[in-house]
């Protein structure tokens, strides 16, 4: 399971979810959304997968693309009976402190 976001759900689904999320690239910074720190939480319960995530700014021009990629990647690896719901949140506000050390290094921070 990831130490980059909160996870609640069956342990056997955690690796597939992690793999699906790291395949989603934020095209503005060319890094995956987990390393950028855009994922806050994933919860699997009641036949649903709920993803709470944010963007680096409310003016992000690729928000729809990223959310669609999250949904498609999760849909490809999870049981078909699970409904996927992505919730875009603005609190807590994203900061560079959410980035992984590798992402900070690549970005020169």
Image (spheres, rainbow, N blue to C red):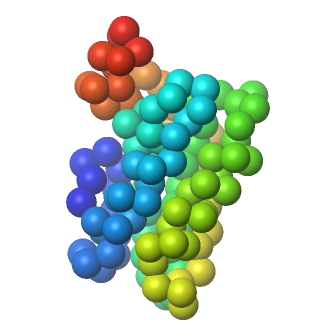
Q: Quadrant of residue 35?
A: top left
The N terminus - image quarter:
bottom left
Can residue 67 be spotted in the picture? yes
Q: Using the image, determine if residue 34 lies above or below residue 12.
A: above
Of residues 72 and 38, the one drawn nearer to the viewer in this rendering: 72
Q: Residue at x 40, y 49 (%)?
A: 22
The number of discs equals: 0
Judge left or right: residue 94 versus residue 96.
right
Q: Nearer the viewer, residue 101 or 79?
A: 79
Q: Quadrant of the C terminus?
A: top left
Q: What is the x, y in percent for residue 43?
A: 43, 69
Q: Quadrant of residue 19?
A: bottom left
Q: Is residue 35 above or below residue 17?
A: above
The x, y position of residue 17, in whole percent, is 39, 65
Seen as rendered, the residue at the extreme top is 108
- Describe residue 52's horizontal placement relative to residue 89 as left or right: left
- The x and y percentages for residue 59 are 75, 28
* Relative height, residue 61 to residue 53 (above, below): above
Q: Residue, x 44% and y 39% (percent of image)?
A: 32
Residue lying at 51% horizontally and 48% vertically, measured from the top left = 24
Residue 4 position in % (x across, y down): 31, 45
Report whether residue 91 is seen: no
Does 58 sit left or right of 48 as displayed? right
């Amino acid at each position: 399971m990831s130490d980059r976001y909160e996870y609640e759900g069956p342990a056997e689904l955690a690796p597939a979810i992690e793999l699906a999320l790291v395949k989603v690239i934020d095209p503005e910074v060319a890094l995956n959304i987990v390393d950028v720190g855009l994922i806050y939480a994933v919860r699997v319960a009641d036949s649903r997968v709920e993803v709470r995530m944010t963007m680096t700014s409310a003016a992000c021009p690729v928000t729809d693309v990223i959310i669609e990629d999250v949904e498609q990647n999760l849909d490809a690896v999870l049981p078909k009976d699970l409904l996927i719901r992505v919730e875009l949140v603005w609190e807590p506000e994203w900061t560079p402190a959410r980035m992984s050390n590798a992402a900070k290094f690549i970005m020169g921070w």
